[in-house]
Image (spheres, helix red, strand yellow):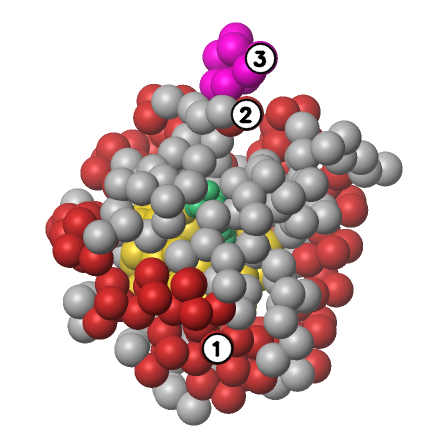
Amino acid sequence: MADRPPIEERFPRPSVMGVVNVTPDSFSDGGVHLRPPAAIAEAWGMLDEGAAIVDVGGESTRPGADPVPLDEELRRVVPVLEGLEGAPLSIDTSKAEVARRAIELGVELVNDVTALRGDPELVDVVAESGVYLSLMHMLGEPRTMQADPRYSDVVADVAAFLEERLVFAVSRGVREERVCLDPGIGFGKTVEHNVELVRRLEALLALGRPLLVGFSRKSSLGRLLGDPAATTGTRAASMGAAVIAFDRGATVVRAHDVRDHVEALTIAAALAG
Ligand code: HH2
């Protein structure tokens, strides 16, 4: 197992995780990076702009998205990872086989939006390789998750879920100090649920792990700006959300517009002291 520092040392607060989706259908950048050279250039550019890590994904998890077969997901992400040798990378996947190939190609973090519920073999791949892990909350699955999501108390429910998933991962050999947790903005949540999660982020911090928050370009931002039918949010709205998530305790911010987020968070950190 590789020797790695705790995740909060590897990714000091605040760190920006750049997003490169190698998909035809992602909600904000679908089709933009489908050809490997475009995705590779975008990722190196994000690292130049100050991203601490770039998250490469070959399956959209936007509301309504259908699952992608294993061979198609591999076909999308492997050439991109091969072209990014030596770069700090994470893989946005819930499939053990995709994670295995990605780790062979140097990926250091597995970002699983199903929090190890999607593929029973993924926990062993993470534990045996010793890579970092992000566990995210999602209610339901992408195809149906936005159909009337309900919670008794969204923050308490998300916290209980993340705690249970963390205990599970550790019980299967994942080192706790390599895990971060994510409330899963937009994954089975209304605008009000997303707002509540950021407002009360300290309840998730109480779980004792660094938090990753991904509000970038999400439809709740467009809706908060007054368009009830919005499917995306603007860059400026994303940065507003990122700064507040950081101020409430987030360590890693997942974002598409890296330079703006790095600059906004650098100033937020300087002023917050
Ligand atoms: N959001 C998306 C995808 N992966 N992973 C984590 N840990 N947290 C998030 O909030 C998160 C995520 C959705 O955004 P995007 O990748 O831009 O879109 P799509 O899923 O349509 O590819």
Can you tell which mark lies on residue 118?
Answer: none
Q: Give the mark nearest the N terminus, 2 or 1.
A: 1
> In the rendered structure, does residue 125 fall within the stretch colored magenta?
no
Spot the residue most to the top: 226
Seen at 52% across and 10% down, the residue is 227
What is the distance, in whole Å, between disc 2 and disc 1 at their CAs?
Answer: 33 Å
Q: In the rendered image, which quarter contains the C terminus?
A: top left
Residue 154 in sight in this render? yes
Q: Quadrant of residue 162?
A: bottom right
Q: Give the mark nearest the N terminus, 1 or 3.
A: 1
* 233 left or right, relative to 67: left
Give the residue pinned by disc 1.
97
* 122 left or right, relative to 165: left
Spot the residue most to the bottom: 1
Highlighted magenta segment, given as a residue range: 222-230
Give the residue pinned by disc 3.
228
Q: Is residue 25 above or below residue 71?
A: above
- Neighbour tally class for label 1: few under 14, some 14-19, many 20 plus, Cα within 10 Å: some
The residue type indicated by label 3 comes to: Pro
Q: Is residue 192 above or below residue 177?
A: above
Indicate the position of residue 118 as horizontal and vertical percent values: 64, 65
Q: Give the mark nearest the N terminus, 3 or 2.
A: 2
Q: Secondary structure at mark 2?
A: helix
Indicate the position of residue 43 as horizontal and vertical percent values: 22, 53
The residue type indicated by label 2 comes to: Ser
Q: Nearer the viewer, residue 70 or 84?
A: 70
Seen at 55% across and 44% down, the residue is 65
